[in-house]
Image: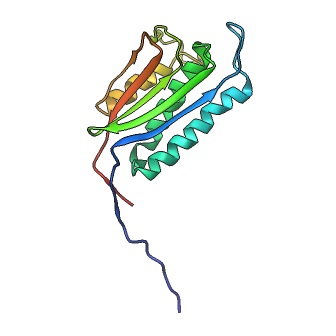
Amino acid sequence: MTTTAVKTPRTVRHREGDVMNERFQAAPRREGAPPRAEDACQVGVMRRIAAARLRYCGLTAMMDDVMVVVSELLTNALLHSGSQDIGLSITLRDRFLRIAVTDGQPGAAATRRRGSNYSESGRGLHLVQAIAAMHGGRWGTEGAGATTWCTLAISAPERL
C-alpha cells in the first residue's frame, strides 16, 4: 500500500507595508577603482534576503523580475556612487511593490546609450525601465539622485 501526501492549496495574502529594509557597508575605495570582491558579494546576499521576504509575503510570481531590479540597482550604487553605506528597501503599498536603493550620494542616474550587443555593461537601467513598464510601474530617482527606485504593480494573491 502506498500513501501519497497532497499539499492543500492555500491563498497567501500580500502583506501591505515594509517587505524589507536592509543596509550593507562597502569598503572605501579610490575613484575609478572597482569594488572589493567581498563588497560585490553583498549584492547576492541582499538578493537572497529579498527573495526570502518576497516568499514570506506571497509575492513569488514576481520573484525573477524583482531579483533583476534588485541586482541592477544595487550594482549601480556599488559601482557608481562610491558610497560606503548602501541600503535596499522594498515596500508594498496600494498594490505596488516599490524597490529603492539608497547610497546617500547625490548624482544623476541616467540610462546610457546602449552599447553594442557585445558590451559587458551599460544595460542595467534599461532593464529596470523595461521591467517596470512590463509591470505597469516606473522608475526614477529622488534626493538629488541619492535614491533610485522602481515600482511594479502586483497581481492578485497567489495560491500555494
Vertical side of 23 occupied by 35: above or below: above
User: In front here: 1 or 27?
Assistant: 27
Residue at 49% x, 25% y: name it. 101
User: x%, y% of residue 85?
Assistant: 60, 22
Residue at 67% x, 32% y: name it. 41
Q: How many marks?
A: 0
Name the quadrant containing residue 16.
top left
Q: Residue furthest bottom?
A: 1
Question: Could you tell me which quadrant the C terminus lies in?
Answer: bottom left
Residue at 35% x, 65% y: name it. 10
Name the quadrant containing residue 34.
top right
User: In front here: 25 or 10?
Assistant: 25
Residue at 60% x, 16% y: name it. 83
User: x%, y% of residue 91?
Assistant: 39, 36
User: In front here: 23 or 48?
Assistant: 23
Name the quadrant containing residue 80.
top right
Colouring scheme applied when the structure was drawn = rainbow
In the image, 20: left or right of 132? Answer: right
In the image, 43: left or right of 61? Answer: right
User: x%, y% of residue 38?
Assistant: 73, 29
User: x%, y% of residue 106?
Assistant: 49, 9
Vertical side of 156 occupied by 95: above or below: above
Vertical side of 47 occupied by 60: above or below: below
